[in-house]
Image (cartoon, grey):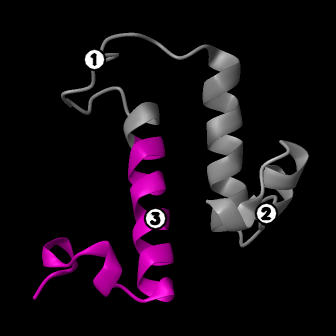
Amino acid sequence: MQIADLKVADLTVKELKILIKETVAEAMDSLLNTETTTDDPDEGLELRPEVVTQLRDALRRRQAGERGTPATAVAKELGIEWDEL
């Protein structure tokens, strides 16, 4: 059985994190790769150069093993109770 055939409820936390990371990486790659054809309603629109630079920098930092801000810290900064999500 492939992971695509599973329900989220059937995934371990580790498997879910891997799936999320792969999905985000694919989305970033798609945004940065203008040759990619998708069903994206924003297809054909260009990202501002500074956004492309920020995305590339974030991807490089992540690939180098640098961790970003934990989601719990972002939620706290936004006044969101993480346990409620």
Q: For the residue labelled by badge 2, is the local secondary structure a helix, a strand or a loop? A: helix
Q: Residue furthest right?
A: 77
Q: Residue furthest front?
A: 84
Identified at 86% across, 59% down, the residue is 73
Q: Residue 41 shows which numbered tag?
A: 1
Residue with the mark numbered 2: 72
Identified at 33% across, 80% down, the residue is 9
Judge whether residue 70 can be spotted in this image.
no
Residue 22 percent coordinates (x, y): 42, 64
Q: How many marks?
A: 3
Task: Tell me which amino acid carries mark 2.
Answer: Thr
Q: CA distance from mark 2 to mark 1?
A: 31 Å
Q: Which residues are magenta?
A: 1-29
Q: Is residue 28 left or right of residue 8?
A: right
Local packing at callout 1 (Cα closer than 10 Å; few below 14, some 14-19, many 20+) is few
Residue 35 percent coordinates (x, y): 27, 29
Q: Residue 20 shows which numbered tag?
A: 3
Q: Residue 14 shows which numbered tag?
A: none
Answer with the quarter of the image where residue 18 lies: bottom left
